[in-house]
Image: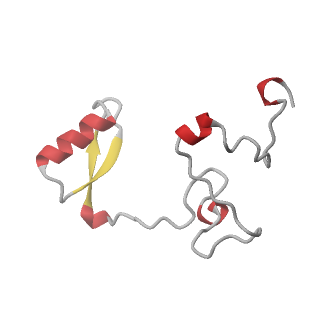
Amino acid sequence: MEGEFQNSGIDDKSNMNDPEIQSAKIKIFLLKDNKIPRDLVPLEELFDHDDVPKNPTMVPTEKGVEDVNIGALEKPKMVKLSKSLSPEMKIKYIALMI
């Protein structure tokens, strides 16, 4: 190790009483063994190597969305927005994406 990390260690618990760490209100929990708790799922099971969800839970249906051009007529940029959005909300979403 070099520089500011020279005297640091991942498993080093000697700095747990450091006021800077305590003032940051970091909540750390230690597992008794190397088993993952039942309710936690490894991220590798949810995402591929490009961070794209393997099984997305929200899949838009074509009948519930409409294509909206947020680009110019010469160079369109199409996005899909819900048909159930109010006109005011559509304007806000379009302004956010431009």
Quarter where residue 69 is shown: top left
Q: Where the N terminus falls, by quadrant?
A: top right
Residue that protrudes farthest toward the top in the picture: 3
Relative vertical location of residue 63 with respect to residue 18 in this rendering, above or below: below
Residue 83, horizontal then vertical, whole percent: 20, 58
Image point (68%, 70%), residue name: 36
Q: Nearer the viewer, residue 32 or 95?
A: 32
Residue 95 x, y percent position in the rendering: 25, 35
What residue sits 61% from the left and 68% below the top? 41
Q: Residue 47 is drawn in which quadrant?
A: bottom right
Q: In this view, does 83 lie to the left or right of 38?
A: left
In the image, 4 versus 50, the foreground residue is 4
Residue at image x 34%, y 43%? 78
Q: Where is residue 60 in the image (x, y as percent from the top left)?
A: 35, 63
* Horizontal side, residue 70 vs residue 44: left or right: left
Q: Residue furthest bottom?
A: 38
Considering depth in this image, is 63 or 6 the residue closer to the camera? 6
Q: Which residue is drawn at 63% across and 50% down?
A: 50
Colour scheme: secondary structure
Question: Is 55 rendered above or below residue 15?
Answer: below
Q: Quadrant of the C terminus?
A: top left
Q: How many labels does the image show?
A: 0
Q: Whole-percent x and y of residue 56? A: 48, 64
Q: In which quarter of the image is residue 43?
A: bottom right
Most distant residue in the right direction: 1
